[in-house]
Amino acid sequence: MDDTPSELFEEADPPRRLIRSADLRHAAFDDVNLAGSTFTNVDLSAATWSGARLSAAVFRDVSLRAAMIRDADLRDVQIVESNLAGMRIDGVLVSELLALYRAGLARSDEAGRPTGR
């Protein structure tokens, strides 16, 4: 039985449940399958994700400003064309890590050694 309020969802093409212009502040989702879901123009500030499985998720044009990621499996995660100002990993500024990495590459290039890139 589907007790989903029909006024919350619109039909979409291809067929899927579409929620548009909804105010779901302070909503709680428990044991919900969102695999294959798309979030566009969604404000997730102050959201809490606990036990979330986001394998193969794509975040594009999102703000994760001041987010805390703890006890996460970040294997094979890619961060591309993003503002990393103030981002820290285990308390270390990522901008400083990248600066050290790039300086090491430059020294390797100058010495004519392989860089491992």
Image (tube, helix red, strand yellow):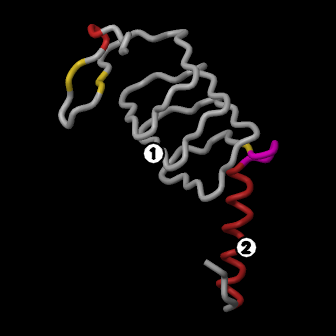
Indicate the quadrant containing the N terminus: top left, top right, bottom left or bottom right: top left
Disc 2: which residue:
104
Q: Mark 2 or mark 1: which comes first in sequence? A: 1
Quadrant location of the C terminus in the rendered image? bottom right
Q: Which residue is painted at 40% across and 9% down in the image?
A: 23
**Alpha-carbon distance for marks 2 and 1?**
31 Å
The three-letter amino acid code for the residue at tag 2 is Gly
100 shown above or below 54: below
Residue 10 found in image quarter: top left
Residue 35's x, y, as percent? 45, 38
**Front-lying residue, 2 or 20:** 2
- State the predominant SS element of the stretch in magenta: strand
Asked whether, in this view, residue 71 is left or right of residue 67, the answer is right
User: Identity of the amino acid at label 1?
Assistant: Val
Quarter residue 48 falls in: top right
User: Going 60% across and 59% down the picture, which residue do you hit?
Assistant: 76
Q: Is residue 90 magenta?
A: yes
In the image, residue 20 above or below residue 60: above
The residue that label 1 is drawn on is 58
Q: Which of 12 and 89 is in front in this view?
A: 12
Magenta region: 89-93
In the rendered structure, does residue 82 fall within the stretch colored magenta? no
Query: For the residue labelled by badge 1, is the local secondary structure a helix, a strand or a loop?
Result: loop
Secondary structure under tag 2 reads helix
